[in-house]
Image (cartoon, rainbow, N blue to C red):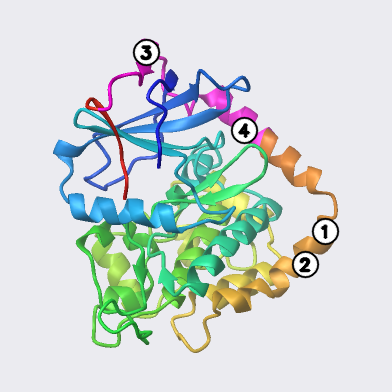
Amino acid sequence: MTINRYLTYRIIDTLKRSKSNDEDYQDFQTYLTYDQKDKNKIKYILRQIDLEKLTDLTEFIKELSWYKQFDHTNLMSLKDCFLFDTKLYLLKPYAPFGSCADLLNTNPYGIREQLIAHILWQTLQALRYLHDRHIIHRAITSKNIYLCDNGRVLLDNFSHCISMISSFDGKLKRQINDYTAKAKDQLLYLAPEVIYQNTTGYNLKSDIYSLGTVACELANGTNIYTNMLHENLSMLYAKIQGSEPILLDQTQLTNEIITFNNNNTSYIEEIKKRKYTKEFHSFIKSCVTTRLELRCSSDELYNHSFFKYHKKLNHNQHILYNEMVKLLEIYKKQGSINAQMKNIEEIFVNSTTEQMTSWEF
């Protein structure tokens, strides 16, 4: 990857988005920027990473290598990557809507099914691309799915990706038995078979479970396992016992749900008013069933009736676009994407090659 030694990026804002428990990222800065040589002033995200603070440089380099390998319209790309002193700078496309987690911050009761279908469809295309190459993403969460202002959806965070092709003999594995400590940041979304950590292992379908969990979260406004008594312990026990995420609408409202939300009557009233399509309920069941033989693959989901139903409704793509624009305007008013402006600063990357190095991986 070649870098123009006189390339200049102007930082126009400091970004603050949904929190992460990932120790390798929480102390680093993220900026909104553009290339001063670009007449169109296209905005990008510039992430500054202090290599001296990385807890696992090897894993980080592996993540960068995934960016170099992947090429799909619904996968986040790496536009530029350069080293200055001990700081590594990563340039990525800017998604004005933020992540799905950011979107839920301003829509605590969930978003419309039509928009959810749009997000899931594009995320599924990214998953099919990975799964066709026998790669498990292992981090399908609401904070890793980004929304662009042209309606495009981008799946990011490849730090957990793993190939099912053995690096020793090149053969395709039937299951994976690798369990990383970083998975603690994904617990709410992990499939039961991943949590078991037994010899049976897990496969590509673990990503499908996570996708279904995200779908429920977008519809319900919150992850169904959030705020459970005893937190992670209760969630882990529930999943191991066969608990499956559901869509909370008038058809699923029980006394137990009402009691659990007795301090949030407005949320209960919202549930009473909404009714999701039978196709959406079927889609969720196809994703989050604990029985692997019944859980759909990414290719099977491609032809699911849920997407066929919404394609019939959405002949005019401007409907979806306008819906997303409305959400963006609400988002801007509440100031959830951009933190308060700090001092405007510039990065002039016009040093000698000894000072600035292209980061090849």
Q: Secondary structure at mark 2?
A: helix
**CA separation in Å, label 2 and label 3:** 49 Å
Span highlighted in magenta in the image? 326-353
- The residue that mark 3 highlights is 345
Q: Give the residue type that dot 1 points to.
A: Leu
Q: Quadrant of residue 20?
A: top left
Q: Earlier in the sequence, mark 2 or mark 3?
A: 2
Q: 344 or 239, which is in the foreground?
A: 344
Q: Secondary structure at mark 3?
A: loop
Q: Nearer the viewer, mark 3 or mark 1?
A: 3
Q: Quadrant of residue 223?
A: bottom left
**CA separation in Å, label 2 and label 1:** 7 Å
Q: Residue at x 49, y 31 (%)?
A: 44
**CA separation in Å, label 4 and label 1:** 23 Å
Q: Secondary structure at mark 1?
A: helix
Determine which of the numbered discs, if any, sits on residue 313 in the image: 1
